Image (tube, helix red, strand yellow):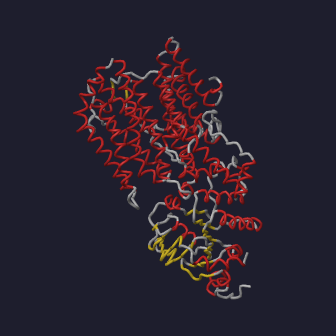
Amino acid sequence: MLKRLKNPTGYFILGGLAIFLVVQILLSAGILNNFWRGIIFWGAAITMVTLGLNLIFGFNGQFSLGQYGFYAIGAYGAADVTYRWVHEDPSGVVVVFFGLWLSLLLYALVSVLLRRFYGITVMTKFTAYLLATILAFWVAVKVLLPVLGPVTMTLLGALPEAVSQQIVFFIALLGGAGLAGIVSFIFGIPVLELGSDYFGIATLSFTIIIKVLLDNTDTLLPFPEMKGARGMIGIPQWTTWPWVFGTFMLVVVVMRNLLHSSSGRTILAVREDERAAELVGIDVNWAKILPFVMGSIFAGLAGGIRAHDMAFLHPQSFNFIQSFNPLIIVVFGGLGSMTGTILTGFIWIFLLEGLLRLYLPSGFETWRFVVYPLILLLMMLLRSEGLFGEYELPFLRRSALPLRRKVASEESEEVA
Amino acid sequence: MAGRPKGLAPEIETRPVLLEVSKLTQFFGNLRAVYDFSLTLHAGELVGLIGPNGAGKTTIFNLITGVYYPTEGSIRFRDVEIVGLPSYEIIQMGIARTFQNIRLFSDLTVLDNVLIAYHPHAGYSLLDSFRRNKRFQAKEAEMTARAQDFLAIFGLDERQNDIAGSLPYGLQRRLEIARALATRPQLLILDEPAAGMNPQEVEQLMELIHFIRERFHLTILLVEHRMQLVMNICEWMTVVDFGEIIARGQPAEVQHNAQVVEAYLGRQTVDLK
């Protein structure tokens, strides 16, 4: 048993468990108060958002400013599900859960259909998938909700409250992440065609659109419970350390496994040279959509975690100036370095929201957005490869493969 | 070397047609880049496409590989119309190409460069790679072994963990050809493979082209500026100028074609010797 753990994966699992236990004990013993608990959870959320951005920008080379938009979608989406649930309304749970699966089903159908035609334009593709999404959620709201709503209510109601609460929270997180994924997929189809610079501008406007929509959730959108620019209150505070740790580890492991696979190599190839990647037979559109959707799902998941920790959401915390936060962290940690992002993400929140908020004079918040860009600028000039440079934890490293034994290669030459 | 093409030529005519380009025309705005270009490639041929700078050779390659959509004309590969297909599907059908200016994934390792070209044949799904199950492990190991075998053929196996951009120029060209061949093509399109090479490297390149052609049973279409290279290895040549075909035939015939001489050297000079 111990021997099996003596490899990077084993150390990673043991290290993860140790961190989990230490933090859990500190939290249970009350050594870490609510403030520090919030800082740790916040750090984890920001790090997940930033890992997503690193996947999109650092590994795939698509400059994105839209990450906070997806963070917001995840936060508001998940919060709405649980908010409705605690107000005896199963509609959030039913619509989000079944809407997601229906959408995925319809996407599969649409992609099979589209494959039958030559020369499909981007806008056709976009329209087809958009219509599929609308249809899926229309069905979920108009057909499934009246039928399954009461059923879900009685089924989950029959369980003890502690259990049903966890199930609803799980569906809420899944829903927030899934909604972010769906929106990024639909949005990404036309926009990823643009190429990196224009993509950056498009994603910036996406963040602004989301912010404006959130400001008007009660007037423009039919979500009075989100209360528009006044901020959404009354979200149950369900985020616990096991949830934070679990989702965080899920994000890290999924991202690492993606990057260490063949699809991961195509993602890197697109960053290196898009044209060359296409001309060695790689579906470049897919190799750009995939990391974009994955990165957005990470952000959405983080949003759900953050929303149920703060118990309060305000559109102002998702404006586009905030969306530079993950960008700064990514640049600090190093583009294309997971370890760098993880460490920098936590350090960032720990220093700037933890220590500095406690020890610096109260006017500091105003200066933050003067200081951040300056730090960013200095970083770019002095150490453009990021604080941690090329370093990766052994578990996250794409290790160099050993050279093949010479005997084998001589054999193959004989065959030749 | 010069004797061999003559013996091959009549026999090749009877082989199946691999690529048939007919009446290909491409305008960029008012600029006529390619006009009424036709070309038939039989399986196993080695054909050169030459012409002065700006004659439209690279445009023709870009049209064949789906980078541009032609204004007019048809391109059939193995009897399938490929105009309008996205590049990656054309490549997966069995056309591979290299670039005039080398385009490797220069921050990745030599091995990764080849593995990326294997991606369409990876044989495991995205879900498998998230779960890292047995199938993933097995297929990944198989892919790596194949890529290593493949690099050994090109003498690059010792360099598998080097960053591609750090290789010397000749090896980068070699790696680019290896990466193109890793897509398992039937037709290989080489866009000025000898550009920027010294005479010794050109010599090695010519050997390499002959070697891969026999080893992988390839049909090769080659664009080249260096007449020496083209004259030595191509069996058939097509000469284009201003996007139009001005001559075609065996190297020796083409060499003395008045129009070709004019296109290359101008009107005054007639004697190529």
What percent of the width, then of the height, locates residue A350?
54, 25
In the rendered image, the vertical position of residue B257 relative to residue A406, given as above or below = below
A403 and A383: which is toward the camera = A403
Please state if B47 lies on the left or on the right of A127 as rendered.
Answer: right
Please state if A33 lies on the left or on the right of A121 as rendered.
Answer: right
Specify the quadrant of the image occupied by residue B104. Answer: bottom right
In the rendered image, the vertical position of residue A65 relative to residue A84, given as above or below = below
Residue visible at 51% across and 11% down?
A: A29
A119 and A3: which is toward the camera = A3
What percent of the width, then of the height, locates residue A121?
39, 58
In the rendered image, the vertical position of residue B144 relative to residue A156, given as above or below = below
Specify the quadrant of the image occupied by residue A302. Answer: top left
Q: Which corner quadrant holds the N terminus of chain A?
A: top right
Residue visible at 44% across and 37% down?
A: A297
In the rendered image, the vertical position of residue A290 relative to residue B45, given as above or below = above
Q: Which corner quadrant holds the C terminus of chain A?
A: bottom right
Farthest residue to the top: give it. Answer: A29
Residue visible at 56% across and 32% down?
A: A342
- Tally of numbered tags: 0
Please state if A350 lies on the left or on the right of A180 as rendered.
Answer: right
Farthest residue to the right: give it. Answer: B200
A148 and A394: which is toward the camera = A148
